Image (spheres, coloured by chain):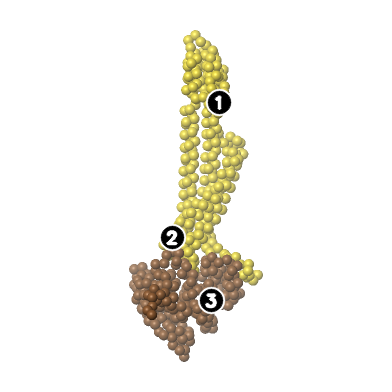
Chain colours: A brown, B yellow
Amino acid sequence: MSRNPSAAAAFQAADEIVRFEDVGLRYGDGPEVLSGLDFVLTPGSFHFVTGPSGAGKTSLLRLISLAARPTQGRIEIFGQDAARAGARLRPALRRRIGVVFQDLLLLDHLSVFDNAALPLRISGRRPSDYRGDVAELLTWVGLGGRMDSRPPTLAGGEQQRLAIARAVVNRPEILLADEPTGNVDHEMALRIFRLFVELNRLGTTVLIATHDQDLIARSARPVLHLDQGKLSLRPAQAPP
Amino acid sequence: MTAFDPVRWRPAPLLPPEGARSGSLLFVVATLCFLACLTAIAVIASDRAARGWVGQLDGEATVIVRPKRGETPDAAAARAAEALAGVAGVAEARALEPQKAYDLIRPWLGDISDLEDLPVPRLVAVTLDRKAPANAVRLAQALKSQDVDASVDDHSLWIKDIRRSANLARGLGAAVFLLIAGAAGAVVAFATQAGLAGRRDVVEVLHLSGAEDSYVAGLFQLRFARLAAVGGVIGAAVAAGLAGVLRLAGGAQGLTPALPIAWSDLLVVLACPILAALVAAVAARLTAAALIRDME
């Protein structure tokens, strides 16, 4: 029995959560930061993104998080054309994506609790519905005693954990993290990594940009390697 | 120090405080609201004065009587008053004493002793029926039918001038009011631009956390509407206070008959905080929405 073409397309769409087709990116009149990117992320997958500084890792995450629009090619997120998504669709797509930014982007005038609760608040949920969950999550990442503090009073590692808590608080379908273990000690890095693995086990698609080769070697996950704006896929390797 | 209790947690404002900038903006908005309230009170008071004057003039007419050959001025005036008394739309027609006519022209001629020797025309004061007043044409016809040589002045020229002045005052008041509202809107738009430019990081985080443009614009709208409402309350209170002092100092007639302030006039300032908030909300919303669209 031959497969119906539209059913095949639907099957394909359901099996892909992110699709890049010949994607390029340049900022203003500058040189191309990314070019000819072709890859697909399936729901529930876990990838690292590596590459030397300036290779375009952050730009790649910005494209997936809809913080930037491609200057070439096509990006589909959740089956939607991300570049053409309008003012209503983009926020809806973003709410399904959690991002840990390299520069964290915490709001200094808000408390730790307010920062962590931000995505839930923006989604329009009532505080009474999520207070408990936020408190539990903050306790889990080791910030239970700092919920009323302001980000500038936190140590670097604490700020990083807060950014992670904010990224995962609404149980996103995709989690993007840009150097999430950059400012934390080895033990905390492993703890954070275990959180990502747990979220991935629950179905979240995870993409982590990192320089931490030790973490990559331990995890046995596929790696998207970026170099001079070009992408190559390195399959998962068994841990040493 | 008490421990943080998530159950008692209330969401904090998403926009950081503006600090000194909000103080300056509050001062400017309060000043504009003060000026707007004073303008409104002045327009209402001058409008009342104009209506009062028109009301007085509207219900009266003056007839200047010229005696016929062989007729005394007093007899001519009495005949004119009699002729007018029976006209429909006239409540009363009364020949004024000669002294009143002398009193009227004395300021122009000076205090001369033989004023009585001059051929001063007599005047008849006509009080018109308020409900269906007779017009000048009907009064003139009635006088002509009784062969009285007289001119009727129904004050229409004055009334026209007063009405024109009142309309001009109203128009100017509305123009000043619109100008102030425009200035307030421009100040708020400028403050919104500055607020957005200084808080790009916050806007970016809100966007990337899934906030719609309208949600972010709404934050600025709410912030500036609140600030303008507070400025409106301050400006309105100061303007009402000043008008109250003028009312106390000048009594019911005000400091000048052209501005008879009534206590009820002060109620107009109640609308100020609402209007100020409305103008600020619209200005902030439009500015923020346009800028946020460009940021994306």
The answer to whether A90 appears left or right of B3 in the picture is left
- Looking at the image, which is closer to me, A224 or B191? A224
Question: Is A235 placed above or below B85 here?
Answer: below
Which residue is most to the front? A1
Q: Nearer the viewer, residue B99 or B158?
A: B158
The mark that comes first in sequence, 1 or 2, is 1
Q: Mark 1 falls within which chain?
A: B
Residue A43, compared with residue A150, is above or below; it is below
Foreground disc of the pair 1, 3: 1
Q: Residue at label 1? A: B129
The answer to which quarter of the image holds residue B262 is top right
Question: In the displayed structure, would residue A211 be above or below residue A88?
Answer: below
The chain under label 3 reads A
- The CA distance from mark 2 to mark 3 is 32 Å
Q: Look at the image and tell me in which quarter the N terminus of chain B lies.
A: bottom right
Disc 3 residue type (three-letter): Arg
Q: Amino acid at mark 2?
A: Leu
Of all chains, the one bearing label 2 is B
Residue A106 on image: x %, y %: 51, 70
Q: How crowded is the residue under tag 1: few (<14 C-alpha within 10 Å), some, or many (20+)? A: some
